[in-house]
Amino acid sequence: MTALEALTFAPPPDPDAATEALRQEVRAFLAAELRDRTPQQRAESWSAADPAFSRRMAARGWIGMTWPRRYGGHQRSALERYVVLEEMLAAGAPVGHHWVADRQSGPNILRNGTEAQRQAILPRIAAGTCSFCIGMSEPDSGSDLAAARTRAERVDGGWRVNGTKVWTSGAHRADYMILFCRTGPAAGEDRHAGASQFLVDMQRARGNGMTVRPILDMRGAHHFNEVSFTDLRLDDDALLGQEGDGWKQVTAELAFERSGPERFLSSFALLTEAVRVLGPAASERAQVAIGRLCAHTLALRRLSRSIAGMLQAGADPALQAALVKDLGNVLEQETVEVVRLLIDTEPAAPEDATLAAVLAHLVLTAPSFSLRGGTREILRGIIARGLGLR
């Protein structure tokens, strides 16, 4: 297979009357729901958690959209789900409570979980009442998941877990974690062998071998956490999928995490505010810069939508998802820098105050865009390997 063939994207699904009707329904819902939400609040987008908002979304059938009805889903297409996601993100809706669960944890359980696990958890996610966090990254290993040292050892009737996870978004409020850890030795030079995934009930685990400590970001906000396990006991039925299949499962999960519109819309609120403030009388320099950002956004949207089509067809778009995330992160961070150059960050006009607030928020959060979901260096290694370049 040539590099070009390895990188082929499927054509993005064509919009139809049903999806466009859904788009208008979502926009009407958001116009009412977000009417009092400030531009700075909208800039928080999928990092902002509002359980009540998630429940109202769920009542519309917009969580677990592609899942079977027997698990609380709605059996709608991946494109319909994509329409809901991009409208929510573009409007800056506070979707953080259900985001991880709907995006990757639920599909992982649907694919690899036991029937008892599916019945117990998936309907709660679809109802907007169950949240998840991701137990992947560790101290001293960064995005190199194969270097994970957290270990689960078999004991009578279950497992005993010891180790530490870090940068765990939302662990302080999540109901469950999907934990990636070692359950056996690596097989020779295969660093990916001997790993498994577990469902950790965060309420039961707190104070019983699990400690969650806050990590404050540059804004002083509590979003990240360090999660430590000291002889945490998990029952046999906490194992997700087959023992030793953790690497295969986690890489499939990451395709869901890396391919969505959140990977290029995190700075969209800033672009919207910049266009509003610059207005029709914007300088030629500003028009060129904003036009370029808009063109890149449209190109990434097309690529991201094509991955939704690949997922709908049952394909494994891990390589394509890594590329979209890397390009999306570049755009998100570039948007912040371009707007800083175009507009005074300390404007005197009162009407510009909202832009300054959004810009200030994103200046401090943008460095994390190329870390979360896999660092830029790791992603580019994945892309190079997928293209046969290393």
Image: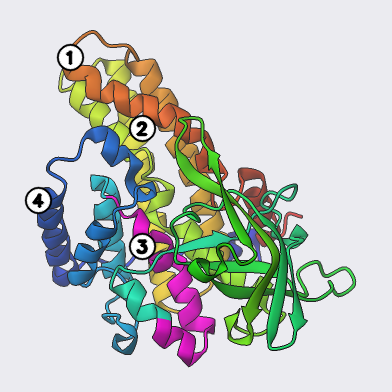
Distance of mark 2 from mark 3, alpha carbons?
Answer: 33 Å
Of 243 and 291, the residue lying toward us: 243
Q: Secondary structure at mark 3?
A: helix
Q: Amino acid at mark 2?
A: Arg
Give the SS element for disc 1. helix
Q: Earlier in the sequence, mark 2 or mark 3?
A: 3
Residue shown at 25% from the left, 15% from the top: 283
Residue underneath mark 4: 32
Amino acid type indicated by mark 4: Ala
Is residue 381 visible in the rendered image? The answer is yes
Query: Which residue is labeled 2 in the image?
Result: 292
Left or right: where 389 falls relative to 307: right
Mark seen at residue 200: none
Placement of 381 over or under 249, stated as above or below: above
Residue 368 in magenta stretch = no
Q: Earlier in the sequence, mark 2 or mark 4?
A: 4
Q: Earlier in the sequence, mark 3 or mark 1?
A: 3
Residue 270 vs residue 117, the one in the foreground? 117
In this rendering, the label closer to the viewer, 2 or 4: 4
Q: Which mark is residue 98?
A: 3
Q: Quadrant of the C terminus?
A: bottom right
Question: What distance separates the C-alpha of mark 2 from that of mark 4?
Answer: 31 Å
Q: Which residues are magenta?
A: 94-120
Give the dominant element type of the magenta stretch: helix, strand or loop: helix
**Residue 206: quadrant of the picture:** bottom right
Classify residue 149 by image quadrant: bottom right
Number of marks: 4
